[in-house]
Image (tube, rainbow, N blue to C red):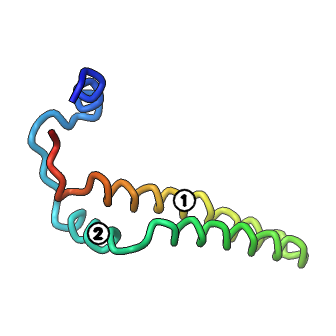
Amino acid sequence: MGTLGSTMKTALGTTGSHEEGAVARAIESQTARLPSDLFLWAATGSILASLGLRFAGDRDMSQFVGQWAPTLLILGLYNKLVKVAGHERTMA
């Protein structure tokens, strides 16, 4: 790994040995089984449901449902990171 990789490892605090806890390992093993696009479709559904609720006149519920989209996208990002660089991967 080049200088950039070494710098990123240092900045992220991953230069030494690091072991995940039992809870993190359990979450990662379950999360890695889900397809990554599931979260994208769920976020899209949240946005569409929010629009539908807004057009139906339920402003409060529309905002509540619409705010799920960023959370779902972040969970999708976590899912992808677990698949690419999960706890079972070794740092080179």
Give me the residue at 24% from left, 32% from top: 9
Tell how many labels. Answer: 2
CA neighbours of label 2 inside 10 A, class few (<14), some (14 to 19), many (20+): few
Q: Which residue is disc 1 drawn over?
A: 73
Residue 85 - label: none
Identify the image quadrant of residue 56. Answer: bottom right
Q: Is residue 17 above or below residue 15?
A: below
**Amino acid type for the residue under numbered disc 1:** Leu
Rendered location of residue 29, percent (x, y): 25, 70
Spot the residue most to the top: 3
25 relative position to 56: left or right: left
User: As rendered, which of 43 and 84 lies closer to the eye?
Assistant: 84
**Secondary structure state at the residue bearing disc 2:** helix
Q: Which residue is disc 2 drawn over?
A: 27
8 relative position to 52: left or right: left
Rendered location of residue 77, percent (x, y): 45, 55
Q: Is residue 69 above or below residue 3?
A: below
**Amino acid type for the residue under numbered disc 2:** Ile
Identify the image quadrant of residue 54. Answer: bottom right
